[in-house]
Amino acid sequence: MEKILLVEDDLMITESLGKFLRQEGFSTVCAPGQKEAECCLDKGGIDLVLLDVSLKNGNGFSLCGKIREEYLVPVIFLTASDDEYSVVTGLDLGAEDYIRKPFRPRELISRIKVVLRRAGKRQSVFDFYGIRVDADKALVSRDGKEIVLSALEYRLLLIFCQNKGSVISREKLLADLWDVGGDFVNDNTLTVYIKRLREKIEEDPAKPSRITTVRGVGYRA
């Protein structure tokens, strides 16, 4: 389930739009201003940001630039400011789309899905709950510090990144690891590498929060 961060200081819009997005199958979290939005983004797990230009604190344009540079999450402006300067500025800052209020709910959902699909196809840098994974450079880091993984640990983490929010069966993990690396990985080996990966990326490996076990099925990323 994709998680959408709605950055909007109008409580009525927040409540109605949040409810509509949840009915359409999205998880939502709301923030009235830039500081609150950054706190939500710092926690990780955000797939898309719906952003107003005018905020309780901060500025939508400033926040958009920071999101694109630091959090690598797609942004859609959702605002009443539809003058040419605002539209061009928003798009130049890296926003994927610019939708004027009032908007048609079904059109919004369609455009959200297009942006998510487009972002998924070209994504090479992932935010995995505060862990940054650069697939082009095969580099994993947290707070700017590199996390050294073995080749198989890295491939395993990348699979979790690409399936974030989903439950992944052990069978699928074994099949994907075989397809990617060509190495033989059996069930016992998978257990060992899950343990090793958790020791490197979890705050408390004994109580994992990024990769959790779903008994009888597999793991939730």
Image (cartoon, grey):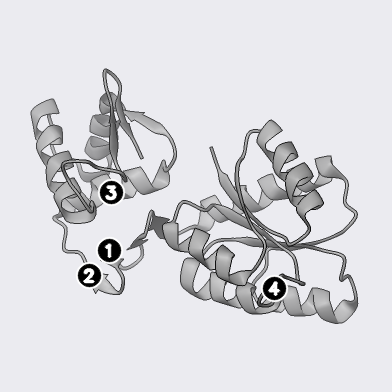
Residue 134 visible somewhere in the drawing: no
Relative to 37, residue 113 above or below: above
Between residue 219 and residue 58, name the one nearer to us: 58
Question: Would residue 135 be found to the left or right of residue 27 on screen?
Answer: left
Spatial separation of the CA atoms under disc 1 and disc 4: 29 Å
Q: What x and y, as percent, mark residue 45?
A: 46, 51
The amino acid type, in three-letter code, at marker 4 is: Gly
Q: Secondary structure at mark 1?
A: strand
What residue does disc 3 label?
Answer: 157
Question: Would residue 209 be found to the left or right of residue 66 on screen?
Answer: left
Query: CB of mark 2 within 8 Å of CB of mark 1?
Result: yes
The circle on residue 107 is none
Q: What x and y, as percent, mark residue 190?
A: 15, 34
- Residue at horizontal 44 percent and vertical 56 percent from the top: 44
Mark 3 or 4: the one toward you:
4
Along the polypeptide, which appears first: circle 2 or circle 1? 1
Furthest residue toward top:
216
Q: What x and y, as percent, mark residue 109?
A: 74, 43
Question: Would residue 47 be found to the left or right of residue 184 on screen?
Answer: right
Along the polypeptide, which appears first: circle 2 or circle 4? 4
Residue 9 visible somewhere in the drawing: yes
Image quadrant for the C terminus? top left
What residue does disc 1 label?
Answer: 140
Between residue 172 and residue 66, name the one nearer to us: 66
The amino acid type, in three-letter code, at marker 1 is: Val
Relative to 132, residue 143 above or below: below
What residue does disc 4 label?
Answer: 60
The amino acid type, in three-letter code, at marker 2 is: Glu
- Residue at horizontal 37 percent and vertical 48 percent from the top: 161
